[in-house]
Image (tube, rainbow, N blue to C red):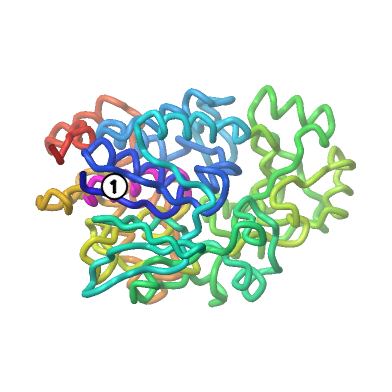
Amino acid sequence: MAKVVVVGGGWAGCAAAISASKAGAEVVILEKTDLLVGLGNVGGIMRNNGRYTACEEAMCLGARELFTITDENATHKNMNFPGHNHATIYNVLKIEPPVRKLIKDMGIEVRIMSRVVDVDCEDNILKAVILEDGEKVEGDSFIDTTGSSGPMGNCSKYGNGCAMCVLRCPSFGGRVSITARCGVHDMIGERASGDFGAFSGSMKLLKESLSEEIQKDLNENGFAVIPLPKELRNEKKLDIKVCQQYALHEFAENIILIDTGHAKLMTPFFNLEKLRSVPGFETACIVDPYSGGKGNSIRYMAVSPRDNFMRAENMKNLFVAGEKSGFYVGHTEAICTGSFAGHNAVRYLANMEYLQLPTSLLIGDFISYSNEEMHKKDGAKKRCTFAGSIYFERMKELGLYTIDKEIIKKRVEDVELLDIYNKKLLI
């Protein structure tokens, strides 16, 4: 059976593996840590703003599995918080086990603590990836979903040092770019200042370490807004973060918390002593990243140029997805691009014409538009997400944003792509 090797087990990697498996390939996931879903273990926000449209469209295309799990593990639904509507919040403490079970039940091989450090590549064809212990893992097509965060040297050079985030590079090793090892010239994102990279946009507090009043707001409403004293407000932080959909004045003037099992604080880092000076936070405890009082992980350090089929530039059998494939933000964006890359990776094996999602579909326009924009002047400073910033505005202008499920389904039916990801391509 033809084999697809997925490098990286975050949301994009899991989505790619599921899609490739349903299309008929043998699939293996190589994940360098001991957890799947990557940053999904500390994220938790789904269906906010245009992500609702993207989620429903992806499900109509056939990518239902992971969105079903996030919906089933939601602690809050149809939630509105500053700048964001109809959000679903899943419990980050419970999300990984059901995803791992789903993937294993599908017959997908999961190899944790399997860090890829090199490749065997010839004539733009990737033949095998090489693990840290020297083992060669051969495949017929490959998908690089290693993301763009770190490794530690980048977090030190362009950030405030290793923040000891969920990626845990000191223990499991830093990210290695598969595309770069194959000779692809990766792109690096920039901040508005021109500095390289961007800080991850949030940190987590132990919910039980906060005042009873804040805990009550989080448990009942899913979020809490606590005004910041003027001397603690810092709008400069809005420009350095990945998540530009939260780069709103409300997020500089207030502490905004989201209940994801922990209390997700929507800022890259916050000095603990100053945080504890705010009423309700006197005994606040930071749980992610452990050095969230000083810094956070640095991202956008290795984004691969690619085509609109999700193939890495100049490569024949290497595909990319998630943050590896664009200056993207979010779980929904990772799942959408991963599902598409996994499907086309099998089309390559079946010697079939690649699927290109039409721009009449939201995900098709997102993939095409973001690809075009990142190659323009100052393109490395632009962030694309369904949830806000420049792309959400584009969605509204084009009339792509809707929460009407029937309209979304009809768009997919009109281009004859309903359940396309469920079609078996290899017999």
Instruction: Place residue 243 in its image quadrant.
Output: bottom right
Quarter of the picture holding the C terminus = top left
Give whichever of 396, 32 is nearer the camera. 32
Q: Main secondary structure of the magenta part?
A: helix
Can you say whether 155 is above or below 103 in the image?
below
Direction from residue 407 to residue 171 in the image, left or right: right
Q: Residue at x 70, y 44 (%)?
A: 204
In the rendered structure, does residue 338 fall within the stretch colored magenta?
A: yes
Please provide percent x and percent y for residue 333. Answer: 40, 47
**Does the rendering let one see residue 243?**
yes
Secondary structure beneath disc 1?
helix
Give whichever of 127, 281 is nearer the camera. 127
Can you say whether 322 is above or below 77 in the image?
below
Can you say whether 258 is above or below 238 in the image?
above
Please provide percent x and percent y for residue 48. Answer: 48, 37
Direction from residue 330 to residue 425 in the image, left or right: left
Direction from residue 35 to residue 259 in the image, left or right: right
> Which residue is disc 1 drawn over?
342
In the rendered structure, does residue 391 fall within the stretch colored magenta?
A: no
Please provide percent x and percent y for residue 342. Answer: 29, 47
Give whichever of 366, 120 is nearer the camera. 120
The residue stretch that appears in magenta = 330-345
